[in-house]
Image (tube, rainbow, N blue to C red):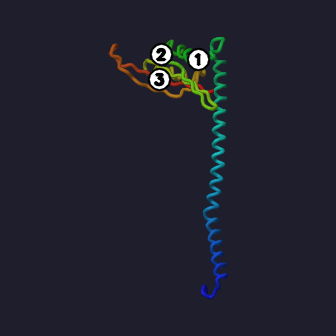
Amino acid sequence: MWDKLNIKQRFAVLLGGMVGVLWLVWSFSLSNTLDRYQRYQSQQEQIRQYQEMKVQLMTQKNQVEQHLAALNQPEGEAISDFQERILFRLTQELENRKARIAEFPQLHEEENKQLHVKTQHFVLEGNYFDLLEVLNQLENGPYVGSIASVHFYKKKNKRLKRVQLFMKVYVQEIA
């Protein structure tokens, strides 16, 4: 059959075959790839929007928690400074417990594009149950900040010849 066709007819058959093959390739692979790429782009846009909403909600949540903490403050005036609020709450919680503040270093502040993050860490020393009670009251009592990390460790005090338990707590405020 191929031998009976002239050059123009052979070219037309080959061209028609190539168009058919291109149509098959398009229908089986390329159209699916483009559809998936468009779906990927729309999902990336949704993720970006959700992240922006998350940042806005976190700042609103912190503002509401600060407002609630100001309303729950036992004294007449609310303490506005982050460090002072933490120190006030710690001294309240440690009054009747066998625990003490071992370290209370300076506040660490970091500012990103839209967030202002204040991080305060402190170290408490005492027995395990008292430290857990203080941690529970900091978490569930009036708002002082979000507890980002807690680390328990022990040190041997050679002067007192005993092992002491310490709890390092990181508290953050995101505004």
**Residue wearing tag 1:** 85
Is the Cβ of the residue at disc 3 closer than 8 Å to that at disc 1? no
Mark 3 or 1, nearer chain start? 1
Q: Amino acid at mark 1?
A: Arg
Q: CA distance from mark 3 to mark 2?
A: 10 Å
The circle on residue 101 is 2
Write the residue at 65% across / 52% down: 39
Q: CA distance from mark 1 to mark 2?
A: 15 Å
Residue 13 to residue 153: above or below: below
Q: Residue 49 location in percent, x, y?
A: 66, 40
| Mark 1 closeness class: few <14, some 14–19, many ≥20 residues within 10 Å | some
Helix, strand or loop under label 3: strand
Mark 3 or 2, nearer chain start? 2
Q: Amino acid at mark 3?
A: Lys
Q: Residue 83 location in percent, x, y?
A: 56, 18
**Residue wearing tag 3:** 168
